[in-house]
Image: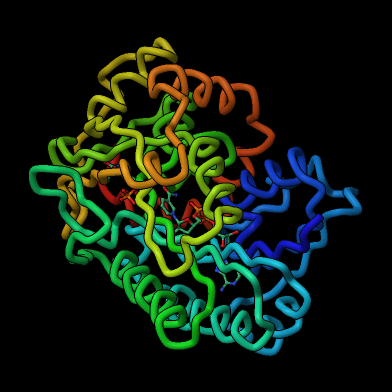
Amino acid sequence: MARLVVTGGMGFIGSAFVRRRLASTRDEVVVVDKLTYAGNPNNLKEHRDDPRLTFVKGDVCDGGLMDRVAKGADAVVHFAAETHVDRSILDAGVFVETDVVGTFRVLEACRRADVGRLVHISTDEVYGEAHGAPCTEDAPLVPKSPYAASKAGADRLAYSYHATYGLPVVISRCTNNYGPYQHPEKLIPLFVTNALEDKPLPVYGSGASIRDWIHVDDHCAALDLLLEAKGIEGEVFNIGASQERDVRGVGEAILRILEKPAGLLQAVADRPGNVRRHAVEWSKIRARLGWSPRKAFDEGLRETVEWYRGNEWWWRPVKTGAFQGYYEVQYRGLA
Ligand code: NAD
Ligand code: TYD
């Protein structure tokens, strides 16, 4: 049994990881989460009374708090971040605060507490554009958005704590995740829930930008290995699925599943600095740790659409209140 601290465990991927650990291990899990607009206690509703889960509401930028929770932890998995590219374009400051300064506080706390493993959740966005072959772990970091640049800073800061202090850090760089409990500001849940509401699906520019889509459960299975494998400290592992799809194709597939008209796709202005293509080479984690993704995109997308169709209780409240204000600013001019 291990004592595991999970930052950002009330978000999309963090909560999937916590559910997985509680189901498949005897870990005691401490979730530290600020509950920003993206953090949602309903993501761990089924574990509310689980004695192996402790929730600490707090900010990773709070060094004293991080010292207290890291003390006695066997490992920390650091998901907490501001994560939405569009919001980073509207207001970059909180991204620098949480993603860079917050990561610094987490690293300091892990160093002082002598934590046995820190899995730092980075992202493939740190590479910027994938030109030609998918990016390998040693590709240059050319982040294009304030989100990606903040994550690149955090990623290299995490590495520096290994190189300088010997902190047992492992860094993951995963491609775009999809699945249940993803905040409807992100492409797939926004398109699915808008389609369910018979609202237009806003396609940035021509909809030709490409992402490699991985099911969140496949990502979490890879993170189990990064948490437990011996002899990988200081290393970076790409996690991908080789399922490259453009935005318009994803939108069309969702509309087909829901039997809604293709006319719901509506072109809007492109995101400034939008990355045309993200794609990573993930043969390293396959060769070294024996991981490969299992969920085919068509099947995973269908299941995900069905999950949103069956769980309106979860997403309808998320789309009200402050989200409405964000939506109006972000999608000005959308019919
Ligand atoms: P999310 O936005 O759904 O969740 C982020 C969580 O962090 C929320 O629960 C939020 O309340 C919490 N949080 C934010 N600021 C905090 C702070 N200052 N202190 C404590 N908690 C705070 O994000 P996600 O999609 O689950 O992403 C999780 C991690 O995975 C992030 O580090 C992200 O960069 C990385 N990542 C995401 C993807 C993806 O496709 N979603 C891909 C690769 C990497
Ligand atoms: P997103 O889900 O924000 O992920 P990221 O930018 O981190 O990869 O966006 C994925 C792609 O979808 C990106 O090219 C922008 C595009 N997009 C739209 O076309 N419309 C939208 O409403 C959103 C949110 C994204």
| Whether residue 29 is situated above or below residue 25 in the rendered picture | below
Residue drawn at (39%, 39%) of the image: 286
Q: Nearer the viewer, residue 231 or 113?
A: 231
| Whether residue 259 is situated above or below residue 121 in the rendered picture | above
Residue drawn at (64%, 88%) of the image: 112
Percent x, y for residue 44? 73, 47
Q: Residue furthest left?
A: 132
Q: How many dots with numbers?
A: 0
* Quadrant where the image shows the N terminus: bottom right
Q: Nearer the viewer, residue 148 or 163?
A: 163
Percent x, y for residue 207? 18, 36
Q: Nearer the viewer, residue 98 or 125?
A: 125
Residue drawn at (24%, 44%) of the image: 279
Residue drawn at (55%, 20%) of the image: 306
Which quadrant of the figure has residue 105? bottom right
Q: Is 233 situated left or right of 151 in this image?
A: right
| Whether residue 137 is situated above or below residue 217 in the rendered picture | below
* Quadrant where the image shows the C terminus: top left
Colour approach in the figure: rainbow
Q: Nearer the viewer, residue 124 or 35?
A: 124
Percent x, y for residue 233? 48, 67
Q: Is 225 situated left or right of 253 in this image?
A: right
Q: Is 116 situated left or right of 164 in this image?
A: right
Q: Residue furthest top?
A: 259
| Whether residue 225 is situated above or below residue 218 in the rendered picture | below
Percent x, y for residue 287? 37, 41
Q: Residue furthest front?
A: 231
